[in-house]
Amino acid sequence: MVWTPAGQFATSGLVPTSFTTANRLAELLGDWRQGGSAHERLAATVRSLILDGRIPLQSRLPPERALAGAIGCSRATVTFAYNRLREEGYIESRQGAGSWVALPAGHRAATDTLLA
């Protein structure tokens, strides 16, 4: 992944198209704390929201600190969840520039499934 001077991800073509606020993501997450460790549940819930299209592809996610405040957990929990999603290919990010929703290779967007 290469960061261009224009602030776009050159290798993935990822250009943020919208911004998901911390409060909006907190609404979408609902009761995400059921079972398992907090960071694993948070990552799983965000992954589900991405896969079903409720968090649009290429949308910018809220900063870790803002999301932690909105959902009432530690920043470390959000950091671990974002790291897990980054490792799995659901998030692309650059330090200081934010994180954007992506899909790992082999996955289709919810809108692609509807159109097929």
Image (spheres, rainbow, N blue to C red):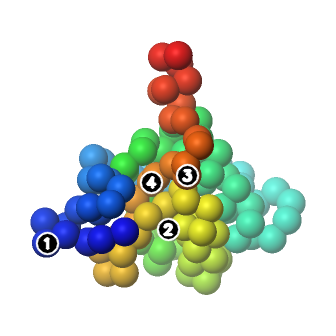
Earlier sequence position, callout 2 versus callout 3? 2
The answer for how far apart the CA atoms under marks 1 and 3 are is 25 Å
Residue identifier under label 4: 101
- Up the image or down, 113 lies above or below 74; here it is above
Mark 4 near mark 2, Cβ–Cβ under 8 Å?
no
Earlier sequence position, callout 1 versus callout 2? 1
Which element type, helix, strand or loop, lies under badge 3? loop
Earlier sequence position, callout 1 versus callout 3? 1
Residue type at tag 4: Val
Residue neighbourhood size for the residue with mark 2, other residues' Cα within 10 Å, grouped as few (<14), some (14–19), many (≥20): many
Which element type, helix, strand or loop, lies under badge 4? strand
- Up the image or down, 98 lies above or below 116; here it is below
Residue neighbourhood size for the residue with mark 1, other residues' Cα within 10 Å, grouped as few (<14), some (14–19), many (≥20): few
Nearer the observer, disc 4 or disc 1? 1
Residue identifier under label 1: 5
Earlier sequence position, callout 4 versus callout 2? 2
Nearer the observer, disc 4 or disc 2? 4
Mark 1 near mark 3, Cβ–Cβ under 8 Å?
no
Residue neighbourhood size for the residue with mark 3, other residues' Cα within 10 Å, grouped as few (<14), some (14–19), many (≥20): few
Residue type at tag 3: Pro
Residue 15 in view of the camera: yes
Question: Which residue is painted at 62% across and 51% down in the image?
Answer: 47
Q: Is residue 44 left or right of residue 97?
A: right
The answer for how far apart the CA atoms under marks 2 and 3 are is 23 Å
Quarter containing the N terminus: bottom left
